[in-house]
Amino acid sequence: MSDSFDLSGRLAVVTGAKRGIGFAIAEALAAAGADIIGASATLDPTSSAIAGRVAELGREFSGHRVDLADRAQTVAFAEGVAAGERPVDILVNNAGTIRRAPATDHPAEWFDEVLEVDLTSGFVLSQILGRGMLERGQGRVIFTASLLSFQGGINVPGYAAAKSGVAGLIRALSNEWASRGVTVNGIAPGYIATDNTQALQDDPDRSQAILERIPAGRWGRPEDIGGAAVFLASDAAAYVSGVIVPVDGGWLAR
């Protein structure tokens, strides 16, 4: 049974790999045997903490600085990876951003930016890299969804729209690709202590209200997401497609 979780010899692309959840996913995939192509808007291609960690785990790492809010950069990155010597076995569309303001004050530019990074870039990468997976008849595509793929949130209309779109995109791609050996799934992190949730962590009232709702009684940690990513990337999940796995300390069950 344990061999079904072995990712040795596989190549994974992880966006948003510099820190937070993306770092933890890249680390977990490398620990399971995968080599990593990491991308982030601020990632140093020649030296980064995630590159060092993957090397410590005995795997190869290739870093790329890619602003996923820029469509041309996203396309160029995906096409470059697709043209590489090694085929991509696993794609993790994790990169994301969030902008907080009431809907009546939420600039349209913010809305557009969040949708581009959180939703459209994942579609573009899946489309370009998915072609090779479909030709080979095997592959894993994993999106970082959100609790707001199920709920509406407060003061984050762009983010809620993007993550709801991610849920729909997961189902749409799964419907087309699962019969051709490519599974498409998502992970919905709960309230994880990262930069994206710093404003909530710093607000005593919001933080307390959030903690009171989480049965596990704590904020999540980025490393809490790694196991779900390894599972969905592995042969153990060969018959799992079109689903979003909550990793939320019980939030959605409350």
Image: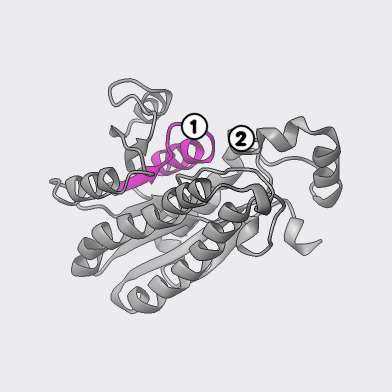
* Foreground residue among 237 and 157: 157
Q: Residue at x 83, y 51 (%)?
A: 213
Work out which residue is located at the far top of the displayed protein and give it: 47
First to last magenta residue range: 11-32
Q: Earlier in the sequence, mark 1 or mark 2?
A: 1
* Foreground residue among 206 and 72: 72
Q: Position of residue 78 (x, y in %)?
A: 24, 49
Q: Quadrant of residue 188?
A: bottom right
- Secondary structure under tag 2 reads loop
Q: Amino acid at mark 2?
A: Thr
Look at the image and say whether residue 31 sits in the magenta stretch: yes
Q: Does residue 233 appear in the picture of this structure?
A: yes
The residue wearing badge 1 is 19
- Which corner quadrant holds the C terminus? bottom right
* Foreground residue among 112 and 242: 112
Q: Position of residue 142 (x, y in %)?
A: 43, 57
Q: Residue at x 33, y 79 (%)?
A: 179
Mark 2: few, some, or many residues within 10 Å (few <14, many ≥20)?
some
Mark 1: few, some, or many residues within 10 Å (few <14, many ≥20)?
some
The residue wearing badge 2 is 194
Up the image or down, 240 lies above or below 116; here it is below
Up the image or down, 234 lies above or below 50; here it is below
- Using residue 218 as the reference point, say whether residue 108 is left or right of it: left
Q: Quadrant of residue 57?
A: top left
- Using residue 189 as the reference point, say whether residue 75 is left or right of it: left
Q: Residue at x 44, y 73 (%)?
A: 239
* Foreground residue among 9 and 198: 198
Q: Are marks 1 and 2 in contact (CB under 8 Å)?
A: yes
